[in-house]
Image (tube, grey):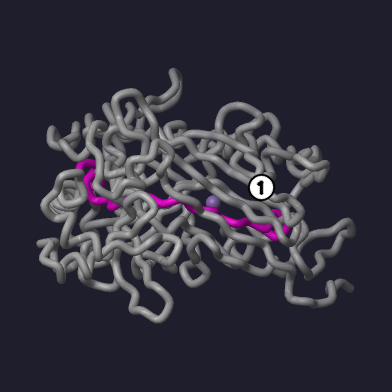
Amino acid sequence: MSENMNDIDFTHDPAQRSWVTSANADATDFPLQNLPFGRFRRAGEAWRLGVAIGDQVLDLRAAMAAGLPLDATLGSDVLNDFMALGKAARVQARALLSRALAAGSAEEARLRSCLVPQREAEMSLPCRIGDYTDFYTGIHHATTVGKLFRPDNPLLPNYKWVPIGYHGRVSSLGVSGQQFRRPLGQFKGEGDEPQFGPARRLDYELEVGVFVGRGNAQGEPKPMDEAEDDWFGMVLLNDWSARDVQAWEYQPLGPFLSKSFATTLSPWVVTREALEPFRVPFVRPAGDPQPLPYLDSPANRERGGIDITLEVWLKTASMSEPQRLTESNFRDAYWTVAQMLAHHSSNGCNLQPGDLLGSGTQSGAQPGQGGSLLELTGGGKQPLSLAGGETRTFLDDGDTVELRAHCQRAGARRIGFGVCAATVLPPQSAPVQSH
Ligand code: MN
């Protein structure tokens, strides 16, 4: 337990600088203190693993060939085997990479040729994702959306006791840069009978995605302290949603085709250790139930939360620059990452290295802090005014949604998540079907 309490070490020292000069810029998301992992290639080359540093990628396979003594799993073309090793291996690799990329390092001479400019790198999903589960930990989102349907009783009675989730779709996961067609689906229009055609209420959801590190054997739940050590890292996640399809299909088994047409992730996995300086207490509002023992631990109470500022930006086809729509913070989540893992495995379900957990939409407490258009427009009733005179209730074809995130506090180096952007394309042409 005590080893969980604080994992701050020299790699978090805000005074440290890198010989990769772009990593020392105030505004970079990827200073020496971040060191996120991703999977990349240049056109015509093989996929391999890399670490973002400033505006460059350190090619790990090339670095190992040049003599950097990283664990052999980092020479793989996917991150799963390294994820499976657990926390000690992450801490060790982080220390080694931090020393090698620090200003004055003797490694500079042999690692310089192992850098690839990020603008030349094509990115992919970082690992084989066996399963994807989407949770619902944003209590302000759950409350606002619940109010649209049940003004007097927005939260269902289970919400404050059990981390709600459902099983998502892996095949349509993509990374930033993804373009996808507006989905077709069945929904209720103005008449009594449903129709089938292009979704009319296409929305985004501002979420973080968590990758599982070390897994658990089937039948052997992960207790809270193991769960805290065994999540690998985080990305941004846009859980695109067709609200008209969702409203018609979701009862009684939950979302299905309203979500499974596309989900977009940011490509750089910010490790649990990089987020260490930004941990905050997990606090329940007065009067709310405390978690049951299997979802509780001293470490979780002391530092289960994470202070991550989350943003949504929209760029319509006629805008030259994206416009910011929302800012919220992951520290407001009702359940922590460790609670998500512990709950998920509590029935004996085996989690595997590289499994993905979505946090659910992260909205703030204020009306302008909705993490989806459904919230920002009051269920599509109050159009949003955009710069340049356009309005939106839901997304138009040609709209690009960008999620961004960063962590910042006095005494720590600011780190960021990069961008998670994707664009809505027109639907496959198909006539609207109705009777
Ligand atoms: Mn979601």
Q: Quarter holding the C terminus?
A: bottom right
Point 68% across, 29% down: residue:
152
Q: Spot the residue most to the bottom.
A: 44
> Callout 1 environment at 10 Å: few (<14), some (14 to 19), or many (20+)?
few
Amino acid type, mark 1? Glu
Point 20% across, 60% down: residue:
111
Q: Is residue 229 magenta?
A: yes
Q: Which residue is nearer to you in this view: 153 or 355?
A: 355
Q: Secondary structure at mark 1?
A: loop
Q: Quarter holding the N terminus?
A: top left
Q: Is residue 275 magenta?
A: no
Q: Please state the horizontal and vertical placement of residue 173, each as a whole percent of the image.
A: 49, 66
Point 61% across, 27% down: residue:
366
Point 20% across, 45% down: residue:
102
Apparent side of residue 78 relative to residue 434 in the rendered image (left or right)? left
Q: Which residue is nearer to you in this view: 169 or 403?
A: 403
Q: Is residue 129 visible?
A: yes
Q: Spot the residue most to the top.
A: 286
Residue 107, picture quadrant: bottom left
Q: Is residue 247 visible?
A: no
Q: Please state the horizontal and vertical placement of residue 119, each as a whole percent of the image.
A: 45, 61
Q: Which residues are magenta?
A: 223-248
Q: Please state the horizontal and vertical placement of residue 334, each as a whole percent of the image.
A: 44, 35
Q: Is residue 257 above or below residue 300?
A: below
* Residue at which label 1 appears: 321
Q: Is residue 292 above or below residue 233?
A: above
